[in-house]
Image (tube, rainbow, N blue to C red):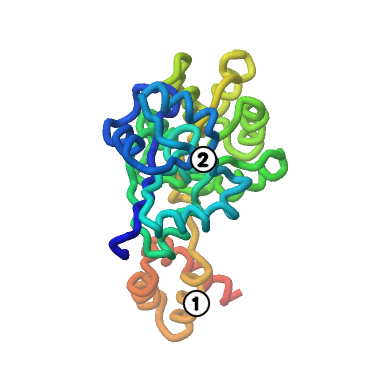
Amino acid sequence: MPDQYGTLYVVATPIGNLADFSLRAIETLQQVDLICAEDTRHARTLLQHHGITTHCIALHQHNEDHAAQGIIEKIQQGISIAIISDAGTPLISDPGMPLVALAHASNITVAPIPGACALIAALSTSGLPVTQFSFLGFIPRTSSARRNLFNEKKNSTETWVFYESCHRIADCMNDLASVLPPDRIIAIAREITKMHETIIKSSLQDMRTLIETDNNMRRGEFVVMITGAVIDKKEEGLTEQQLKTLKALLQECTIKTAVSLAVEITGARKKLLYQTALELSSNNQK
């Protein structure tokens, strides 16, 4: 990075409670030359609360593609700029990606100022497995598109997470119920860090009933987390490639040798390979 360039700071802001703001984030926003905010009116409340007087300009999904180049040019002139979203960590289902991508392409330093993130806060308190998870952001608005997405994810063994609005949460639960078994464990985090914060883990069936019967559970902002599918070893089958390998080996070797080699080559379970080999051999003799 040329010495005269400024820095682009990606600054996380509170997702509800205004006290969830790091000292480093406050100092950064006080010291930069300019703040790019998703909504300058929304940002003003937070900035005034913490005594931050730095000038703000708007950077949102409707203008970011056009505005990004101008912001980069300012940084190249030595101006340091921070980007914030309305709540939480920028770019996580919020604007900012074109600017950050262009900054990297322009050899500009991009510095994270970590803080609140609804996704991580929800996962950490959900009680669901979080070693591996996939984040879907805001899911489609129509029922058919949601069901298509859920069908794609239903057999995933990792936890999957998405954001949903109060206007669609009940319909979303109905769409989930049309695809997933009623005993699938899910968790919902609602209004995180706010007065009516609610974090519930239950079966899909119980969660659906709760949302239908409790008006409060249809208010606020939601993080929905679905535990991964459990693979039943009894129903496990060979992949197409594993089966192809086994068939090729059976043409040249005994069942015992073919299975032994297939275990080494494919990594499939020996018992499953042996059972499949017997079935193939039996079918060939008919």
N-terminal label among 1 and 2: 2
Q: Which amino acid does label 1 sit on?
A: Lys
Residue at point 51%, 27% (across, down): 203
Q: In this picture, is 214 found above or below 266?
A: above
Q: Residue furthest bottom?
A: 252
Instruction: Give the number of the disc on residue 57.
Output: 2
Q: Check disc 1 and report the residue beneath it.
A: 247
Could you tell whether 117 is left or right of 22 in the image?
Answer: right
Residue at point 46%, 74% (across, down): 246
Give the alpha-carbon distance from disc 1 to disc 2, as whole Å: 65 Å
Q: In this picture, is 225 found above or below 190?
A: below
Q: In this picture, is 191 found above or below 130?
A: above
Kind of element beneath mark 1: helix
Residue at point 56%, 22% (across, down): 220
* Viewer can see residue 270: yes
Kind of element beneath mark 2: strand
Residue 178 x/y as whole percent: 66, 36
Query: Which quarter of the figure has residue 33?
Result: top left
Where is the C terminus found, in terms of image quarters? bottom right
Could you tell whether 217 is left or right of 242 in the image?
Answer: right
Where is the N terminus found, in terms of image quarters? bottom left
Contact between labelled residues 2 and 1, with CB atoms less than 8 Å apart: no
Question: 87 or 219, which lies in front?
Answer: 87
Q: Which callout, 1 or 2, points to the residue nearer the camera?
A: 2
* Viewer can see residue 126: no
Residue 106 x/y as whole percent: 42, 64
Residue 148 x/y as whole percent: 66, 47
Q: What residue type is labelled 2?
A: Ile
Question: 135 or 225, which lies in front?
Answer: 135
Residue at point 48%, 63% (across, down): 238
- Please rate how many residues cluster around mark 1, counting C-alpha atoms within 10 Å: few if below 14, some from 14 to 19, many from 20: some
